[in-house]
Amino acid sequence: MPIEFRIETARGTARAGRLLTPHAEIETPVFMPVGTLASVKGIAQDTLEELGAQIILGNTYHLYLRPGVETVRRMGGLHGFMAWPRAILTDSGGFQVFSLNELRKVTEEGVTFRSHLDGSSHFFSPESSMEAQIGLGADIIMAFDECTEFPADRERMRASMEMTARWAARSKKYFEEHKHEVPWNAGSGKNHVGTAAFGCAGEREVAGAAAELRSAGPPGAAVPTQSLFGIVQGGMDRELRRESALRTIEIGFPGYAIGGLSVGEPRELTREIVESTLEHLPADKPRYLMGVGTPEEIVEYANLGVDMMDCVLPTRAARHGLLFTSEGKVSIKQARYAQDQGPLDPGCGCRVCQRYSRAYLRHLYASNEVLAQVLNTIHNLSFYLDTMRRVRHSIRLGEESRFSSSVRSRPEP
Amino acid sequence: MPIEFRIETARGTARAGRLLTPHAEIETPVFMPVGTLASVKGIAQDTLEELGAQIILGNTYHLYLRPGVETVRRMGGLHGFMAWPRAILTDSGGFQVFSLNELRKVTEEGVTFRSHLDGSSHFFSPESSMEAQIGLGADIIMAFDECTEFPADRERMRASMEMTARWAARSKKYFEEHKHEVPWNAGSGKNHVGTAAFGCAGEREVAGAAAELRSAGPPGAAVPTQSLFGIVQGGMDRELRRESALRTIEIGFPGYAIGGLSVGEPRELTREIVESTLEHLPADKPRYLMGVGTPEEIVEYANLGVDMMDCVLPTRAARHGLLFTSEGKVSIKQARYAQDQGPLDPGCGCRVCQRYSRAYLRHLYASNEVLAQVLNTIHNLSFYLDTMRRVRHSIRLGEESRFSSSVRSRPEP
């Protein structure tokens, strides 16, 4: 009884539906803000709730190093630790091991790498990644994969894809044997605290979603637990992607991700691989495209039939003063905004656009005030979440093509 | 019709009352959070409202350099610029000129100093400080004074105190001739925008307080404007302080500040000078002690009869992980909090203590997450503002001595 996915409207390749997880019911397609170290940088959890985020993402690699899985597990998992009652997804740690470690050593068994913090040596395998992710206790966790570098030749792409397939099988095997150990599963038999024990806001929300999942089965049936998603790799080769999809489906997961994209390839190629890979994924399971993208791209991929996306772009760009608006991108550091009394985005209802002027936001950024990051991030997340809200609405109304063109940002003058 | 001050309860030397300014009615004694660059570092204005801050402080020196007075003036003053509808006080710039500039040159005319940002040369005089503060448009502004260094010999303290007295007279003269130029005064004849034009939250609050001030006089009477407070100097010499108080009172201001303390002298001396100076200040005018203090000190000074205080301590300490609680100081970076599932302060109702554990706050700080600064600052400000709320309550109930001892923090183990 891990998750339940219902497609409620399909329009062309796009679909709108609901993903019921132990901690929240998520409307799809959904954009998931990234909260690397159990924090969406600069944003308090109540603000995330106010923005309407139903699911956020944590990075296993970073959390494994700080504060460590055991600390999080003892606090009832990430939900209890960060006092976030809604859904969480963790990645496998694989992507960061590959992107942050030049000295990594990959074997059939797993990956030896050095911490980017202190140089200490660590080892991740499908089993240890699952162990970590079970301890972190996200609603959705990811198989341990190898993210193939770009560019790579076909032989390398094939070998990497096949390793990912073998690691997916090992990930599933370990997960099935240990999933009852999730810290918020009352049946785990371990000491667990967290949301309920600490009395954090939204406690009833947690209990509610869990109860709904429980009541869906017969009395005494499985209690709510995590779900493990498989990841399709295969580099930039459509045929290898197809093969990876089929092998991953054969292992069998409640959801499938497309990994290994946005690694430096041209955007047209990303789109081509996404589109062709989606054809091979089961229509009735959630499809998660990892690590994309711009506001235009998330609309485009949702229209292609992607149900879940995550990206650091809205939060990272905010920290660099790059803001997404209905009128295009705004680089708020520019001197021309110094006396601009208008709101950042006249079309936006977020609390930043409702209250502050561009001149003030520009001043905060130019003065290195921390509030610049806070307000910029609130706006960018609001813009992304609103964009997805409108995508869902347009899918339900069958207006996808009209909407898709209206959000395309104008080039910055 | 600048401000109105009503003492409603006096108990021993302590008094509780109300200070009606053009932008807010302030219950006194009050603690004013410091928002140096038109931002209380890391805290959005709606959060300050939620915390119950009725007045915040801006630093003229910093705002003069960034974003510049003219930019702020065009936005309707600080209220419009930072979208803060409640009261604001600005200092004169004198303290920063003295504390941030080793190469300053003081003459009878004023102070030549170099920007700490780019080394450019600038000049502040009583007149130019008034001009800047009128452009910034705070509800309460401060006379341009010389903050005497510590230690200083008596001759130096006397010369400095006398300069401050002459500068106070010049400050008042310029202010009286130019106060109609405040950017939110409809009679200023200048283009003004800001809170009302920009439609920021709390617009009605602004209009309400202003209307109340207006209606207090006969039809056609003075519209609400700024108030200029005088500053008592005189170093650590009680007799010079008395003389400074008398000379400042002779010039005549609607409120009086005690400046030049917390400059490195022992705390007992601070208290002695405050206590002896207060005796010479008019009982019916607000008394503002600049730049103090710890939670214990603000309680102590309120009980001595101080009505207004400001200090960077709660916000700056928060950024360094030092938190004030009902159980004493907590240095959240310490490893012993790494798995502490309890709230930061069990006696605190702020949104941080209601939601997050010490372990999470410790993790955020140890990981250099920006949310650490945000949450720590919210708690410390909440603790300070709650402390003053309880002081006011205890004065009204006549329980000052009992309360005073109950908030004294235990030494950290």
Image: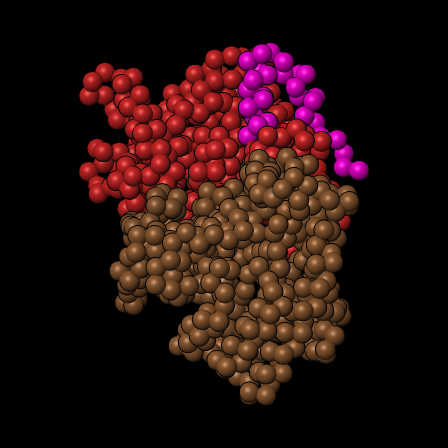
Chain colours: A brown, B red
Q: Residue at x 63, y 16 (%)?
A: B400
On whether residue B64 falls in the magenta region, the answer is no
| Residue interval drawn in magenta | B385-413
Q: Residue at x 57, y 52 (%)?
A: A3
Q: Quadrant of residue B272?
A: top right
The x and y percentages for residue A12 are 34, 63
Could you tell me what secondary structure mostly forms the magenta stretch? helix
Q: Nearer the viewer, residue B72 or A172?
A: A172
Q: How many marks?
A: 0
Q: Residue at x 55, y 61 (%)?
A: A255
On whether residue B399 falls in the magenta region, the answer is yes
Above-or-below relation of B141 to A149: above
Q: Is residue A181 left or right of residue A338?
A: right
What is the residue that sits farthest to the front in this orientation?
Answer: A218
Residue A41 visible to the viewer: no
Q: Is residue A34 left or right of residue A342?
A: right
Q: Nearer the viewer, residue A395 or B62?
A: A395
The x and y percentages for residue A183 are 71, 48
Q: Nearer the viewer, residue A317 or B90?
A: A317
Q: Residue at x 73, y 44 (%)?
A: A187
Q: Quadrant of residue B144?
A: top left
Q: Quadrant of the C terminus of chain A?
A: bottom left
The x and y percentages for residue B309 are 53, 31
The x and y percentages for residue B319 are 60, 47
Residue A180 visible to the viewer: yes
